[in-house]
Amino acid sequence: MRIFQYLINGISIGSVYAIIALGYTMVYGIAKMLNFAHGDIIMVGAYISFCVTNYLGLPAWASVLAAMAVCTVLGILIEGLAYKPLRGTPSLAVLITAIGVSYFLQNAAQLIWTSSPKNFTSVVTMKPISLFDGQIVITGEVLLTVGVSILVMVGLTLFTSKTRTGKAMRAVSEDRAAAQLMGINVNRTISTTFAIGSALAAVAGVLLCSTVPTLMPTTGSMPGIRAFTAAVFGGIGSIPGAMLGGILLGIIETFSKAYLSTQFSDAIVFSVLIIILLVKPAGLLGKQVQEKV
Amino acid sequence: MAMKTLLKNKTTRTNGITYLVVIAVFAVMQVLNGAGLLGSSVKGYLVPICVYISLAVSLNLLVGICGELSLGHAGFMGIGAFSGIVIAALLQDTIPNDVMRLLCAMVGGGILAGVVGFLIGIPVLRLRGDYLAIVTLAFGEIMKNIVGNLYAGIDAQGFHMAISTSKMKLGEGGKYIINGPLGATGVQKLATFTMGFVLVLFTLFVVQNLVNSKEGRAIKAVRDNRIAAESVGINVTAFRMKAFVVSAFLAGMAGALFGLNYSSVTASKFNFNTSINILVFVVLGGMGNILGSVISATVLYVLPEAMRGLQDYRMILYAVVLIVVMLCTWSPKFKEKLSIVSEKIKSLFWGLFKKKEAGTNE
Amino acid sequence: MKKILALLLAALMVVGMLAGCGSSKTEAPKDAETKAPEAVAEAPAEGSAPALKIGLTGPLTGGASEYGLAVRGGMEIAVAEINAKGGLQIEFKAEDDEADGSDKAVSAYNSLKDWGMQILAGAVTTGSALAIAAETVNDQIFMLTPSASAVDVAMTGPNVYQMCFTDPNQGASAAELMAQKWPDATIGVIYDSSDAYSTGIVDGFLSKAAELSLNVAVDNAAFTADNKADLSTQVTQCKDAGCDIVFLPFYYTEASQVLTYANTIGYAPTFFGCDGMDGILAVEGFDTSLAEGLVLMTPFDANATDDATVSFVEQFKANNDGKVPNQFAADGYDVIYALYNACVAAGIDGSTPAADACAMLQEQFAGMTVDGLTGKGMTWDGNGMISKAPAAVVVTDGIYVPLA
Amino acid sequence: MNEYSKKMLKVPTYTLLREQDKDKQPVLDVRNLGIDFGGLTAVDGFNITIGPTEISGLIGPNGAGKTTIFNLLTGVYQPTRGSVLINGIDIKGMPTHKVNKLGIARTFQNIRLFTDMTALDNVKVGMHNGIKCSFASSVLHLPSYYRSEKQANEMAMELLDFMSLTDVADQKAGSLPYGVQRRLEIVRALATNPSIILLDEPAAGMNPSETTELMHQIRRIRDTFQIAIFLIEHDMNLVMNVCEAIAVVNYGRIITKGTPDEVRQNPAVIEAYLGREEGKTDAEN
């Protein structure tokens, strides 16, 4: 019985990783860059949501919309100011700029909202479901996060395969130069990708802080790295891979804490990651691309 | 004659300039220090700057020259630091000479880091690109987690090591060397600026020589075109491994010097952020550009310190500077504009100069 | 391109250096002006000794800045109050050490030394304090840390003193208190194995608990700074073991997660925290009803009604947008007063060389008793460790009530 | 004297008839070679024997599997069936770099130079396994390093000179004109001291005068180094003029083998080409 509770706990944190990883993997798949500032956009989203509910007294859904709006604008701004001028340069250059953006957002958040932690009020008002005499408890947050991440996964898959913009994104991801020749506006497509990724980050921020209530300027960075790990784990660039990677990472983390060692759970989680990458070098659902000779 | 041909060679010349710059800076610093003109802050920067230069140059071997993205360089630094501290503590009585003990600690730390690099490299170097990056990141985290829970100490019975306090039983008069999350405490400070300078020279010597040898050519060939390199008989995995191990070894040596420069060091110092910082030095200095790494490590280390006066705003400004410098040095558009401006200034300057010249001629 | 890059970098460095030097010269008074208006009004009277220079190193940016900024806030209030009194004047400066245990901490300390610091009122975190303490021993600068609580800090040298309990002592007192109040309870411990403070308390607690034969059912539910996002497993472990008391020797930032999750799964043991728990009620957005019944050992209570506390809390709120001070701020405040009292008694002023001040202060602290916000009749032993009565409180209706 | 220099000594060319190859072990002996990609047979039943100083050609329409065959011969792909013997040694299971050490070198259809390195360094990378200098000596720049570097430099210059590339020795390979890059790739392959080199469309992108020059150079390589050459080429003029033996493949199988004249008159070849690329082929002329 206990094992199921741990499984649920794992899925709970795992689905949070998954939804962050979805944003990561989409931006990576299309813009071909590791956006290390993604975790910090999540943090900004959570702060916006916090402010809207706590200072303006608006309902939760309004705070989520506000967070999405602010993060979308922020994402487009960051992309335009910091990433766009570097298009066509080695991906490492953009990576370092992304790190600069990450430092910037963290420190800006500290100046705006101070470093004192805030306790995020969960957007879920549902009472937890208690099964088997309270032996297994499923919180509303778990249901919501799993639901939303599945929704986002399906939505993104449909979006990239069915819509015009989505197809343009896939084209840009496959071959940027060819896409350009086919009349696709590469710059606008990448900006759109960042806009969507950032809006997703806002949702992820709200869900992260609903599950883990402590909100600080550094809140996004560690889950951000975990989610990046999850995205690679599932096969970076693959949308279902990010989902699977996130959930599995959460479950492995919880199980290693529950049954192996709490002290060394970080080491265990990352060792499992390494082992899996050795067996499947492109991640669980990633495509192994053989270079043409 | 030989000297002349040597000077003609462009790579030898750049290498020479790098050595000269480092030696000149060292000499100036020594003179200033001797004259008592250096404040405690500047004196305090000297050793860590040397350490970070070595780290940046060694990472440049991996990232710039070999073309592999590593996000776990601080992990090797950490291995070097902690093993160096343990070695120095164990050799306390055997080798009374501080310099010799420091050397032993650095070499020991380097070797251990190199061995760990080798062991990790065997499975890991089958991966490429971002997957290699994530595995090196994972390695850094594993290292941090393990060392953060490591207890080591010496007593009358000798050396003890354990991974929890309860298992760690030191006898009477025993002394902890590494104390779990407290890290290494009560470390005897052995590091000196001169040793840092020697380390920088040694790192430059190894990396630059390697780059200019057949090994370095092979490493660069693997980066430029893996398939072609294989086709001319180069064992790609072996060369990635060589670069990886040498880089880890040098990082370990730098780590040992770092660890022995402070009375305490914690495992959390060697985290993802430190790895990223070293990577920033490399990328900003120019990938594959050794002198660039030396300069950018120095400048970027001093920069946040120099901005202390800005108090709470200093880190946000550091971030802004970082982004702006990246845009200035990499953005194609900006570079174009910059070159136009510099052309204009040049022509303006030359124009003035020529006028003047013309004037004097008349 | 390379040349341009090199030039750019060099130019930047020069600008940065100039900016740094330029502003550091002017910053100190300006800073004081904005943060504590009273301080500047009292320029030292003509002919009187120059102001005493006290420095603080602590995390002012990054993840731990919450603690550093709180200490700085507390110290600034004390400095302003003292300077307003006339007499011995204090010049105060805080430097950022990013809670780093090695180079950044030493850099911050060196920068204060270049400023002319005579006494160090830091560091805030244990890691930094360890790195800096060894430097102060060499430099013969007196060090009184407000919150670096590891035993090793005080043991570094005879000139290093602490304002807070040492970790193992606090752990041991917790065990004693539990043995006294709930001798038959089943106890669970959740702690941060990557944090010296947390492991230090747990070590002290467990060895005392074994001595008192307490029933500790869960003693290895650890988390690390990297995986603290999810503490549900640890809480579940305690619940499974049927713990009536869950000992939480870590900071309130993570504690709120434990309380929230326990509430979700309907697990309601007695939670027991240490001084790091102080501040949980002031977290913005925190539902204080979750903390109802929480027992914690804190030297400071922001709701206390004595004049000193009331005026301190008021002043702190005025300076910090209405934020309620926690024990970090109170420790900072007490540190400045302890140093001030000792300096006045020993006749130390701005002209006393740091090394002389160091020797004189050691002598003073050996026989000194201080009353402050965090304790009455505080004294120090020869190692520099403080002895003050541990006060346990229980959260009742959203405020601290002394534990009956 | 080094092996390279020995080879550099010009051997007098007697006759171009490969009589001298008879009774000698073939440098390349391929038997029943085949590979499937996920159920799709790309190459099947490929047999060829090449003598130590033979120039042979491999022709066939686009997509016939020519480059795949080269990839099989150099160990880039592991065959599903059959065997490849280089100087009598089976390359089964060997990675590409080991196969190269057996004496086979190649160029690529889409040029694969080390673009960020100079032409000279490209050649020196090719000589990698021939340079005798230990790792320690490389790192520490011991005297043996200077000696071996000097030797390597001279030899690389000699090889560059052989293909008239001395002028571009210090230029970045990526910045060179197309035709020059192709020639440089041949030099790099030669630098590995092979007993056979595979040229994948060496004349692609060259103008007629460059192609003529290339023909001479191909012959000169064989005559000077006494090695075998196996080339894929669409320029029939070059193939017919240079090659002594030609194999024609289509759909991954050999249609015919023989001398240029035999191949020219083979109806199967004409059909294969006429069906597909009449414009491009000169086979009927």
Image (cartoon, coloured by chain):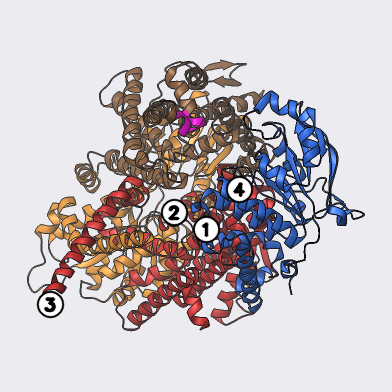
Chain colours: A brown, B red, C orange, D blue
- The residue labelled by disc 2 is B283
Q: Residues within 10 Å of mark 2 (few under 14, many from 20)?
A: many
Q: CA distance from mark 3 to mark 1?
A: 53 Å
**Three-letter residue code for mark 3:** Thr
Q: In the rendered structure, does residue A174 fall within the stretch colored magenta?
A: yes
Element carrying mark 1: helix
Q: CA distance from mark 2 to mark 1?
A: 10 Å
Q: Which label number is shown at residue D211?
A: 4
Q: Given this view, does label 3 or label 2 mark the residue nearer the observer?
A: 3
Reply above or below: A111 against B358.
Answer: above
Q: Quadrant of residue C143?
A: bottom left
Q: Secondary structure at mark 2?
A: helix
* Callout 2: chain: B
Question: Where B228 falls versus A22 (above or below)?
Answer: below
Labels 2 and 1 within one chain: yes
Q: Would you name the residue on which mark 3 appears? A: B360
Contact (Cβ within 8 Å) of mark 2 with mark 1: no
Q: Position of residue A150 (x, y in %)?
A: 52, 19
Specify start and end residues of the magenta stretch as a single range. A172-179
Q: CA distance from mark 4 to mark 1?
A: 45 Å
Using the rendered image, report if marks 4 and 1 lie on a common chain: no
Answer yes or no: are tags 3 and 2 on the same subunit: yes
Amino acid of disc 4: Thr
Are discs 3 and 1 located on one and the same chain? yes
Query: What's the residue type where badge 2 is placed?
Result: Val
Circle 3 sits in a helix, a strand or a loop, which is it?
Answer: helix
